[in-house]
Image (cartoon, rainbow, N blue to C red):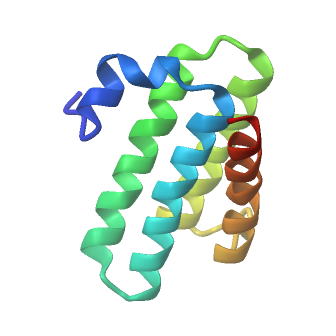
Amino acid sequence: MNYQHKDLAAKRWRELSFLEQMANIGSEVERMLNWRIKKNYDYAQKAFERTLELIDLTLDIDKNYAHLKEVARVREALVDDFTGANQFISSDNSWRKYFLSFAYAARKNY
């Protein structure tokens, strides 16, 4: 795989807590949503690809079943929202609220 987050893929991603990983994924989701709102679909697509890359890194290293289940479901819903028919009826606001809780928790534990 051609990683856009090379330093994270190498080692650093493993050193982050689950909360920190999810907060970082949320940052990419925020970028994706902002570019989609601004109708710059090329940048939105690149942010979406980076989001999936970070999710896949998390799925590769986390062995906690509950985490894997949640992250896999988030991936499925993001792909459905960004490229599919949005069957889960996701909204930009719902994504922001979901990932904000991880950012808050990661910061609080820092």
In this image, 30 relative to 62: left or right? left
Q: Nearer the viewer, residue 74 or 61?
A: 61
Above or below for 34 versus 63: below
Image quarter in which the C terminus is found: top right
In this image, 17 relative to 32: left or right? right
Q: Position of residue 21 (x, y in %)?
A: 57, 35
Above or below for 83 versus 42: above
Image quarter in which the N terminus is found: top left
Residue 72: quarter of image: top right
Above or below for 78 versus 11: below
Q: Position of residue 101 (x, y in %)?
A: 77, 53
In percent of the image, x 64 and y 75: which residue is there? 92
In this image, 26 relative to 19: left or right? left
In this image, 79 relative to 95: left or right? left
Residue lying furthest bottom in this view?
Answer: 38
In percent of the image, x 40 and y 57: which residue is there? 48
Q: How many marks overall?
A: 0
Q: Nearer the viewer, residue 10 or 48?
A: 10
In percent of the image, x 65 and y 11: which residue is there? 63
